[in-house]
Image (cartoon, helix red, strand yellow):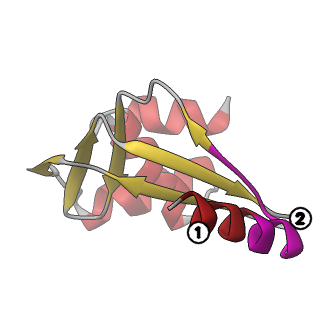
Amino acid sequence: MMRGNREMRRMLDKMGLNMQEMENIEEVVIKTDAKEIYLIKPQVIEMKGKDNTIFQIIAGDIEEKEREVPTFKEEDIILVMQQASSSREKAIMALTDTKGDIAQAILNLTT
């Protein structure tokens, strides 16, 4: 096993990757549009290259939770867009941040 590990490190060095294990990780959260996946006490290995970083995650305990997807009326989104002169995406984000409070969403986008 040690020989394989040594060879793997040499190969990673040749590819310009620096690999190290991250310590004391409590959890990793993966969020999709419909759910959140919690990886509890995972082993995380970070591989840094010139242009990017790769994370390898190994977890024994996994919890999944459905996400609450907020829905807003189309006229509310349009009102925020018009009043704040913002894009649809920004209006939806502002409404999400303010839990649907139209006036506060407009204020947040205009100040």
Residue 17 vs 101, above or below: the answer is: below
- Looking at the picture, how far across and down is residue 86, in whole percent? 61, 57
Range drawn in magenta: 10-20
* Nearest to the observer: residue 7 or residue 48: 7
In which quadrant of the rendered view does residue 111 lie? top right
Amino acid of disc 1: Gly
Residue in view at x 89 percent, y 64 percent = 50
- Looking at the picture, how far across and down is residue 94, in whole percent? 46, 43
The disc label shown at residue 50, or none: 2
Q: Is residue 13 magenta?
A: yes
According to the image, label 1 marks what residue? 4
- Looking at the picture, how far across and down is residue 10, in whole percent? 79, 68
Cβ–Cβ below 8 Å for labels 2 and 1?
no
Tell me: 59 left or right of 52.
left
Of badges 2 and 1, the one in the foreground is 1
**Residue 31 in view (yes/no):** yes
Tell me: 73 left or right of 91.
left
Amino acid of disc 2: Lys
**Residue 81 in view (yes/no):** no
Alpha carbon distance from label 2 to label 1 = 24 Å
Residue 46 vs 8, above or below: the answer is: above
